[in-house]
Image (spheres, rainbow, N blue to C red):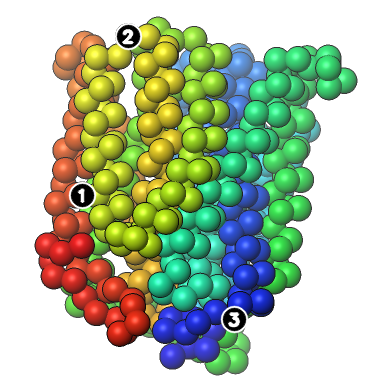
Amino acid sequence: MDGGDTAGKTVPVGQGRRAVLSWAWYDWANSAFATVVMAGFFPIFFKEFWAVDLAVTDSTFWLGMTNTAASALIVVCAPLLGALADQLGARKGFLLIFTALGVLGAGALYVVGQGHWGLALALYFCGLVGFTGSNIFYDALLVAVAAPADYHRISALGYALGYLGGGLLFALNVLMTLFPASFGLAGAPEAVQVAFLGVAIWWSLFALPVALWVPEPPGQGDQPLGRAAREAFRELGRTLAEIRQRRDTVLFLVAYWFYIDGVDTIVLMAVDFGLAIGLAADGLMIALLITQFVGFPAALAFGWLGGRWGAKPGILLAIGVYALVVLLAAGMTRVEEFYLMAAVIGLVQGGIQALSRALFAGLVPPGRSAEFFGFYNMLGKFAAVLGPGLVGIAALVTGDPRLSLLPILVLFLIGAGLLWRVRVPEVGEGGARETAPNGV
């Protein structure tokens, strides 16, 4: 067994607790980019400030292409980078490299002037690659700080801190845009640019604990970079062959791809859905804040639930709640109902992400977490491919945006059906065992 992984071991109480908290604190750090930049200000500011002279359709095209390009790059590179990190024992090193890239991209947006939409997109691309790339190695380090029985709880702690940290910073930034004079700012545009700089400072500051106190799992031995890269390619081929032979890993990854496609589609399309049914932009920002702050205690609750029931039943419960949200959205007419939907999503969004990460960590062979999580994150980047297209087709066919989310039910049903068949290793006093396909 790889000495850096803790599978089958008990994490030391003193040193282990500091490593766990330092690992979880990174979610607090990088969630600022996801909430403030990706979900909050960049899409609106891009259209209204940097690309103000472009046609709306053109700005949408270029923003969409940038998101696609960043996701495609991570999809292509994630498995290989994961294998290379395992070879070199450099999971934390790769995490910090991608963090630096993301921090640079976010912070540099502060100096981009009005009309310079190309430069803004280039820096946003760097931020996206840094954010998504860092998550590969952040997820992989879960096995370095927690014992298998604690994966669900520690994973949930990370997501909970992410929701709280991202929500607090976003709330401050929203206040800055609403009342810029109170913060010594000339107006809302300057407030947004300061918010981008604040994300860079926040991300870099709160990434220090993971750099200082999370252990770097050892690799496959000291070797030159070129040899490690060649071995990583060979290891990647062996991993593909091995994954195909691991029935439950394959089933889970396919199930995850379907249901997380539904989850990500709701995240991506929620603002567009709200605008389409006539809700004001201010109301949508409030809904986003509701999701963040509800997500903090809810993610912790799902960590507890995973400990009581297991990760698989918790994920199935969350999928059921998402399906209910989709059904209720079909009859939505008031902003209060949108707020309620945001709160309900907050109840399960962090939970389904945390328990999915924890369940997969339990399926990863010792010493190969970065490599396997490379595939896991690759599928995460492939998510929201089917969903948005289904939503668009449904809106076009029905002519009613309230019905556009209904096809996502298919993704949730397929994902739940496949997940039901996954045999999940259980860790208890008697050691690891597997449940039956229909067991929980």
- Residue 204 place in picture, x, y as percent: 73, 53
Is disc 3 surrounded by few (<14), some (14 to 19) or many (20+) residues within 10 Å? Answer: few
Labels 2, 1: front one = 2
- Nearer-the-camera pick, 103 or 75: 103
Image height of 53 relative to 254, above or below: above
Q: Which of marks 3 and 1 is nearer the N terminus?
A: 3
Residue named by callout 2: 333
Q: How crowded is mark 1: few (under 14 residues within 10 Å), some or many (20 or more)?
A: many
Question: Where does label 3 land, which residue?
Answer: 12
* Residue pictured at 42% horizontal, 27% vertical: 342
Left or right placement of residue 16 versus residue 402 in this view? right
Position of the N terminus, as image quadrant, is bottom left
Left or right, 241 with reference to 56: left
Amino acid type at mark 2: Thr
Q: x, y (%) of residue 115?
A: 68, 21
Residue at which label 1 appears: 415
| Left or right of 197 in this view: 367 | left
Q: Is mark 1 on a helix, strand or loop?
A: helix
Q: How far apart are marks 2 and 3 (CA)?
A: 53 Å
